[in-house]
Every structure is written in structure tokens, then in C-alpha cells.
Image (spheres, rainbow, N blue to C red):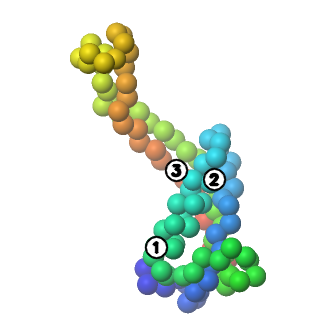
Amino acid sequence: MDALPGGVKHIQIPLFKNITSEPGAEFFFTNALKLEALRSNVARVENEEANAEAILQGTIASITVIADDSVLESENNAYLPKRNVLLTQYKVFVSFDLTFM
């Protein structure tokens, strides 16, 4: 993407609203989006709404964590207590509602 809609050059990304049961997810995803916006150089990220031409608001609608089939069983590993299973991968699905105003 070379430009934002309407040729916007200054945006504000306030803290996302989190309506999931995952505490603190709003900080992680807001900061990740701000970092990507800064890296892209498509627009300058402003801290103050007065300095922004547009606002990107977000709501985290759902977070689903699914354990992958990859497991490490203690019978096959000398470093784990017996009869334990350690999951080695998770898949995380996140649904957002974003509004560009």
C-alpha cells in the first residue's frame, strides 16, 4: 500500500477496545499495528487527535487459541516428568472490527 484513503498522511491509532476475555490483548495488538504503521512510512502516527487527519479505531471482537497436533510426550523425552504432554505449537485466530475515520 502506497497511500491511505483520501491521501491521509497523519493518523492516530488509539488503544483498541477489547471485548474478549483475554486481558491485555488490546495493548499487544494496538502496539503491533502502530509499529507496522511506523515501519510502512505510509503515514505518520500521531499521539494527539488534533494532529491527525484520520483515526483508526479498533475493537478486538474474538480471540481463539487452538492447540496444534504437535506434542512432545514425556515417555519420549528424558527431561520431562513422566505422563506429561507439552504442546509445542498453537494457532491463534483474532477477529477485529476496524474503523478508519
Of labels 3 and 1, earlier in sequence is 1
Q: Is residue 77 above or below residue 21?
A: above
Q: Position of residue 34 (x, y in %)?
A: 56, 67
Q: Nearer the viewer, mark 3 or mark 1?
A: 1
Question: In which quadrant of the rendered view does residue 12 lie?
Answer: bottom right
| Residue in the foreground of this view, choosing between 40 and 18 | 40
Of labels 3 and 2, earlier in sequence is 2
Q: Position of residue 79 (x, y in %)?
A: 30, 18
The answer for how far apart the CA atoms under marks 2 and 1 are is: 20 Å
Residue 85 vs residue 5: left or right? left
Residue at 34% over, 17% down: 80
Q: Amino acid at mark 2?
A: Glu
> Would you name the residue on which mark 2 appears?
26
Residue at 40% over, 38% down: 90
Q: Amino acid at mark 1?
A: Arg
Q: Position of residue 7 (x, y in %)?
A: 55, 90
Q: Is residue 3 above or below residue 14?
A: below
> Would you name the residue on which mark 3 appears?
94
Q: Are marks 3 and 1 in contact (CB under 8 Å)?
A: no
Question: In which quadrant of the rendered view does residue 76 lie?
Answer: top left
Q: Secondary structure at mark 1?
A: helix
Outermost residue on the bottom side: it is 7
The answer for how far apart the CA atoms under marks 3 and 1 are is: 22 Å
Residue at 60% over, 60% down: 30
Which image quarter holds the C terminus? bottom right
Of labels 2 and 1, earlier in sequence is 2
Question: In which quadrant of the rendered view does residue 5 lie?
Answer: bottom right
Q: Residues within 10 Å of mark 2 (few under 14, many from 20)?
A: some
> Would you name the residue on which mark 1 appears?
39
| Residue in the foreground of this view, choosing between 92 and 72 | 72
Q: Amino acid at mark 3?
A: Val
Residue at 64% over, 69% down: 13
